[in-house]
Image (spheres, rainbow, N blue to C red):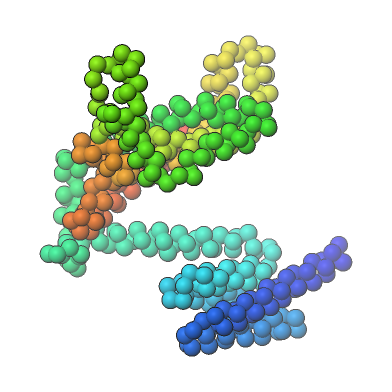
Amino acid sequence: MFGMGILSRKGRALEVFGVLVFSSLLTFFMAGQTAEPPWRFLLGGIGLLDGFLAATWILGLPGIPTLILARAALGLVLGLGMMFTLGLAIGLGLCLLAMALGIAAIPRARLPALLILPGAFYLLVFFAFAVGIIAVISFLKRGPYGGIRWIFVLENYQRALDPLYVQIILISLWIALVTTLLCLLIGYPVAYAMARAPARWRNTLLILVMIPFWTNFLVRTLALMFVLRSDGPINGLLMAAGLIQEPVSLLFTQNAVILGLVYGELPFMILPLYATLERFDFSLVEAAYDLGANEWHAFRRVIWPLTLPGVLAGSTLVFIPSVGAYITPDLLGGAKTIMIGNVIQYQFLTVRHWPFGSALSLILMAMVLAATMVYLRVGGRERVL
């Protein structure tokens, strides 16, 4: 055991040394590719620092791990800044080198907890900070030509409580709920069939489910518009079969919006359900049959409770994007079906009323968060029962 510990420490020392040497060489290379003298000197200085740290690390001087972590933090900050100055490649390279240095220098016992830091930093900068900005703007006044005026007001939230906008929010929630239920009704049997299929066919079926991701969402929506229009194939088939005498209006309706959302969000329901059902022990169903349960009771008492985590995950992945959708309602619903996402887009991009758009965004976020928390809590309680 003592010998294994020595080998482990030596292996870790060589790992850190290798990362430092690689970082030094790559940083010197990036410095040579940079035309601006200040940035070239800065990158060259970082390369010299990495070489110095590599030499002192091998010597085993005290305090070097702390210096390496400080160097990693500095590299992460500089990398984020250089993304907007020297280009994405150099900035991203510095960020990746900084993360590699930090992971290599962190003691193994602390590594699992500290690996959360990059994700936490990303959420802090690109989510929490952005939401904080929107929250501040929502309490400000609109400028005469757009933009904001630094005057604290509550009129944006008062306007959001107007019956017109409340009705639009309720319609958006209803469409998202119907979309989620339809995706669940369609996706659960598909995921169940995929999980029960022979092993040699599962990867093929999984690829077929993911094929829509290979095409741009806007292109798929435009293709659906062609299918639903008055002279499209659906009306043509119905008229050829004698079921209708003249084309029916399928496009620019609420049903068209729901169909488009189901078409776009269905894979996000199938994939979590398939991941849950693939790990499901179907011998439990056979045991239920042996105990006298029919197919319905076996599904309700065995399969459904044990696959509820996949149902909750898929429903969340479908409901949240659906309630804030604006491309599908705009193209398939037209002026007859307006969702809250369309109103928010209109406030930000057309009339430039950022404070009111921010207030609507926060209200929608709060409502979706509350509905999701209640749904997950109720689903978790049903799983326990």
Q: What is the x, y in percent for residue 371?
A: 37, 39
- Give the residue drawn at x 50%, y 60%: 120
Q: Residue 281 is drawn in which quadrant?
A: top right
Residue 275, compared with residue 295, is above or below; it is below
Q: Quadrant of the N terminus?
A: bottom right
Q: Is residue 380 visible?
A: no
45 lies left or right of 17: left
Q: Give residue 73's quadrant in the image.
A: bottom right
Residue extending furthest toward the left: 144
Above or below, 374 relative to 195:
below
Residue at 60%, 82% in the rendered image: 28
Q: Position of residue 20 (x, y in %)?
A: 67, 76
| 164 w.r.t. 6: above or below | above
Residue in the image at 33% along x and 17% along y = 240
Query: 368 or 331: which is nearer to us?
Result: 331
Return the x and y of residue 334 as percentages of the image width and height. Answer: 23, 39
User: In this orientation, does residue 52 appear?
Assistant: yes
Q: Residue at x 54, y 80 (%)?
A: 33
- Number of numbered markers: 0
Residue 43 placement (x, y as % from top left): 55, 82
Q: Classify residue 28 as left or right of residue 365.
A: right
Whether residue 120 sits left or right of residue 363 in the image: it is right
Q: Observer-nearest residue: 133 or 207?
A: 207
Front-most of residues 175 and 115 = 175
